[in-house]
Image: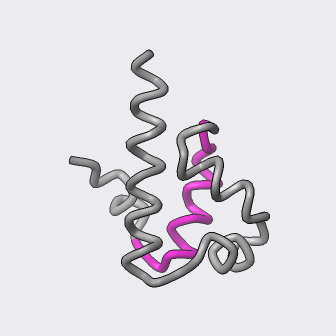
Amino acid sequence: MEKDVELKKLGLRIKELRKMKNITQEELAHAIDKDQQSIQRLETGKINPSFLYLQQIAKGLNVPLSEIFDIP
């Protein structure tokens, strides 16, 4: 299903940005007041994050929100 593919791409992009910043899932989760499992589900495309959740992720990674959507 197309939705699943897009969520996996989004998750991989967030994982890529997190690794570029040398931040663990646990560190990112702590920075945005979430649990590590929530970040794991996001990065594996198992959840469809809300706009507000994506804003929190961008803030936690210290990147503009638009950078999260820079998916090739």
Residue visible at 38% across and 42% down in the picture: 9
Q: Quadrant of residue 24?
A: bottom right
Judge left or right: residue 36 versus residue 15.
Answer: right
Q: Residue 55 occupies which quadrant of the picture?
A: bottom right
Q: Judge by depth and name the residue closer to the eye, 67 or 46.
A: 46
Relative image position of residue 35 (x, y in whole percent): 78, 64
* Up-down relation of residue 50 to residue 61 (above or below): above
Residue visible at 40% across and 69% down?
A: 17
Q: Which residues are magenta?
A: 48-63
Residue pictured at 50% horizontal, 75% vertical: 61
In magenta stretch: residue 65: no
Which quadrant is home to the N terminus?
top left
In the picture as drawn, the residue positioned furthest to the top comes out as: 1
Q: Most extreme residue toward the bottom, as rendered?
A: 22
Q: How many marks?
A: 0
How is the structure coloured here?
Answer: one colour
What's the magenta bit mostly, secondary-structure-wise? helix
Position of residue 20 measured from the top left corner of the image (x, y, whole percent): 37, 77
- Is residue 43 positioned above or below 23 on the image? above
The percent coordinates of residue 60 (x first, y second) are 58, 75
